[in-house]
Amino acid sequence: MSEFIYRLHNVTKKYEGRRVLQVDHLKIHRGEVFALVGPSGAGKSTLLRLLNFLEPPASGRIRFLDIEFSADQPMPLAYRRRVTTVFQRPILLNRNVWANVNYGLQLRGQRNSARRIEMALEQVGLMALARQRARTLSGGEAQRVALARAMVLQPDVLLLDEPTANLDPYNVGLIEDIVRALNRERGTTLVLVTHNVFQAKRLAHRVALMLEGQIVEVADVEAFFEFPSDPRTAAFVRGEMVY
Amino acid sequence: MVQAFHLIVARDPALFEIVVLSLRVSGTALLFSTLIGIPLGAALGLSRFVGRRLVIALLYTGMGFPPVVVGLFVYLMLSRSGPLGQLNWPVIPSLFTPTAMVVAQCIISFPLVAGFTMAAVMGVEPQLRQQVQALGATRWQATLTILAEARIGVIVSVIAGFGSIISEVGAVMMVGGNIEHSTRMLTTAIVLETSKGNFDLAMAIGVILLGLSFLANVVMLYLQGRTFEE
């Protein structure tokens, strides 16, 4: 776990002139589960969009593997396609479940991927619903399809933006098991955004607290929860208001 | 109705010629309107640029253009003393030709295709673009995906474009001249036969026009239905 997959240096992001993100330094190891916790509006999802190269930073540099991404240096498509995101509210295409899972492969011109799609659907327990229209699914099923359509791409990095918010405990457990297995068996780097500290504790190797667009503390999961060095982290872990 | 049926069954050559010309002119105009209107509508619905509101206002104005005004505009442009007509370039069509009628019908229908396409695209979930890009779509692939998601509305835009020109009379009358064996369309033939007092024939042609319009819409609705059932 010594190799860094991301290295961020003085990264900022602004919307309509207002600075919403300022990350001085951040390194994410290849193959780790890295959790970003913090209250709503802390800049976690913004950081995730930058890590997926969906938006450029206002300033600073994001080094991904051996290539840099900045305001004037877009990420080449081949690299961008090594990262994908599962969103809190996935929008599935108005097609059946199979076609949704096949979508990313189609974009890459990969045909004859039936076995991979089957495996992804089996992993999320939705093979029986393969021919069902995606928009008739429940919230939990839709989130599992979103996970399957991301997993089938076999990305180096999977970004998870509140993937279990608003889901019932059964689906939360199921999705956590799937991503844990993905990390363990395939070595996929996971960056998990959550405001649920318990979920971060269950899944992550390292955790970072974000407040008002800045990273307050980054630590191994045990240190983060047992011996936080910043009083705001300690308060957040105790469930106290820190914002 | 009976006369219309007789004319169709007898495959009256004059009527057959008018039907073929009407379909050829309106079909060609619809093809060009679709080729211009769908990309324009998608661009207006998906991108933000300086002057976008002005373009949309112009488009909305175009959607309500009276065909006869379009006919007058094309007439003035293409007439021998008009700005385009006097250039005498081979690519610029002459007045009183089917190509001139195609140009007029194109101007009538493309704002409808573009306007309805724009509305359909804007109706797609705004987050979809970012989510498909997160799955690896290029800008072009994301745009095509959004158009595919808005396909019901896009098909409606084509139906609206077709409806606006197959039944249009003012513009084709002005720029085509209703010349027998050359620019006589179903609508202009109805006007002519009515002015001659041949109400039965005018009615018969009207029924055929309605039938063609109905048939085109059934085909479109069939396509729309298939997209629902996919």
Image (cartoon, grey):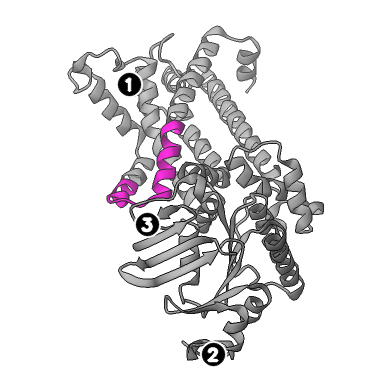
Look at the image and tell me in which quarter the N terminus of chain B lies: top right
Q: What residue type is labelled 3?
A: Ser
Q: Quadrant of the C terminus of chain B?
A: top right
Front position among marks 1 and 2? 2
Compared to A10, does A228 lie above or below?
below
Q: CA–CA distance between discs 3 and 2?
A: 33 Å
Q: Which element carries disc 1, helix, strand or loop?
A: helix
Asked if disc 3 and disc 2 are in contact, CB closer than 8 Å, the reply is no
Q: What element does badge 3 sit on?
A: loop
Give the residues in magenta: B34-57
Q: Distance between the residues labelled 1 and 2?
A: 80 Å
Dot label at residue A234: 2
* Disc 1 chain ID: B
Q: Name the residue under label 3.
A: A70
Q: Which residue is at the front of the view, A119 or B139?
A: A119
Q: Is mark 2 on a helix, strand or loop?
A: helix
Residue contact at pointers 1 and 2, CB within 8 angstroms = no
**Which comes sooner in the sequence, label 3 or label 2?**
3
